[in-house]
Amino acid sequence: MIDPCFFHVDMDAFYASVEQADNPDLIGKPVIVGGTSGRGVVSACSYEARKFGIHSAMPIFQARKLCPDGCYLPVRMNRYLDMSRFIMDILKQHAPVIQQISIDEAFLDMTGTELLMGPPESSAGTIKSSIRNQTQLTISIGIGASKFVAKMASARSKPDGLFRVPPGREIDFIDSCRIKDIWGIGPKAETALASKGITTVKQLRSFDELTLKRLFGQSSGSFYYAVSRGIDPGIFTGETKSRSVSNELTLSEDVSDRETLRQLIFDLSHQVFFRTLSDSVTGKTAFIKIKYTDFSSVSAQKSNTSPFLSAEELFFSAWELFDKKWDRRPVRLIGAGIGSIEESGHAVQNELFDSGYARKHKLEKAVQTMQSSGIHLVKASSLLGRKNSSKRKP
């Protein structure tokens, strides 16, 4: 019987690394991507910046206090999407099955490929070299018998890491991790576990599932039971039943600040919309996802009579959904997407009688084309500061 084999490919400090690759003068410097003013939040930062305590979703003004001499750059989402697509194309040359889960992460199902591509460590090394040679970027790869273990393994030796958990050694690997290193267990979850005297993975595994559910609730209890045994809790299950385009972000720290969450929805909406442009599709349903500290999650969606033809429209709809659904508890994961997908040619044709829609779509397409050609355009993020932005022009 062939053992399952999954790679988790994680691009190291992706946005910041792309900026450093495009501008070698930035190599070795603390690069913070997210804004050039004191407003907004950090979208990504280089490892040099992380040494100052900077992390994603941190307010820019706070990052500037920690690292006043850092290189603060605006988000160039289209450039990152282009590089992401290029890297995914490289991965497709090395793996039979690819599941992209974010702009900078993907799972490769390498089960049964050893005779053709060599041992897992060897084929992973080949992939790393190929990406480095073609993009000047580094990636970290984790190898395991499940997607969950592979994702955990990729974080073990970042950046530029390669770590394999051999089949049958999952428990040993999990036991070597601190509670806070387990994917999905954040600071507040760690505190909740510690309040019950659980400070190690072995202690967590000593509880049966029923007891964990009683102590921490149905969702969290099941999650803790699975991950303490190295079992994939079913987070990375693949595509949804209906075709959609979405992005989500797991926050390094829980966020409850409304304006910070608003900017994150803004960023995610633009990522999603430009992906639909690249795929020549569009959709008329906006949806959002929220996951709280206790792993409970909610989602909401709203369909329009016509497709979204600008990132601005998608953002307004996604934020309206989020603001109505969010119960003001701290958020650990946030997501946004477009559903009811169809080919954009047909969708746009249906909207040609509405010159406003047509002009917006043409503008978005022009922005995408120009940025792909290397022309740097920044869309006005001042949208985020408007009290009644839906009634004003960008």
Image (cartoon, grey):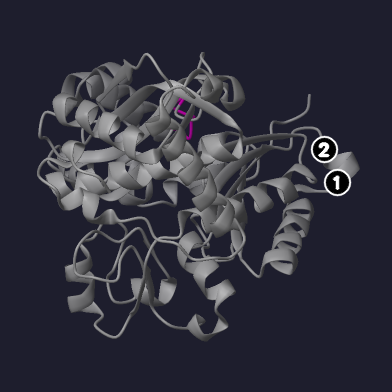
Q: Tell me the CA gap for discs 2 and 1.
A: 6 Å
- Image location of residue 254, percent across then percent down: 21, 46
Q: What stretch is highlighted in magenta?
A: 229-234
**In the rendered image, which residue does mark 2 sit on?**
113
- Image location of residue 155, percent across then percent down: 49, 55
Q: Which of 211 and 349 is in front in this view?
A: 349
Q: Is residue 338 left or right of residue 295?
A: right
Tell me the chief SS of the magenta region.
Answer: loop
Q: Is residue 39 left or right of residue 118?
A: left
**Residue 234 in view (yes/no):** yes
Look at 68% across and 52% down and name the residue there: 86
Look at 47% across and 37% down and name the residue there: 361
Instruction: Tell me the kind of residue under disc 1.
Output: Met
- Image location of residue 92, percent across then percent down: 75, 42
Tell me the quarter of the picture where residue 381 sits.
bottom left
Q: Nearer the viewer, residue 383 or 73?
A: 383
Look at 35% across and 17% down and name the residue there: 304
Instruction: Tell me the kind of residue under disc 2.
Output: Thr
- Judged from the image, the secondary structure of the residue bearing numbered disc 1 is helix
Tell me the quarter of the picture where residue 354 sits.
top left
Magenta region includes residue 232: yes
Q: How many numbered dots are placed on residues in this image?
A: 2
Evaluate if marks 2 and 1 touch, with contact meaning CB atoms under 8 Å apart: yes
Q: Nearer the viewer, residue 372 or 77?
A: 372
Picture disc at residue 117: 1
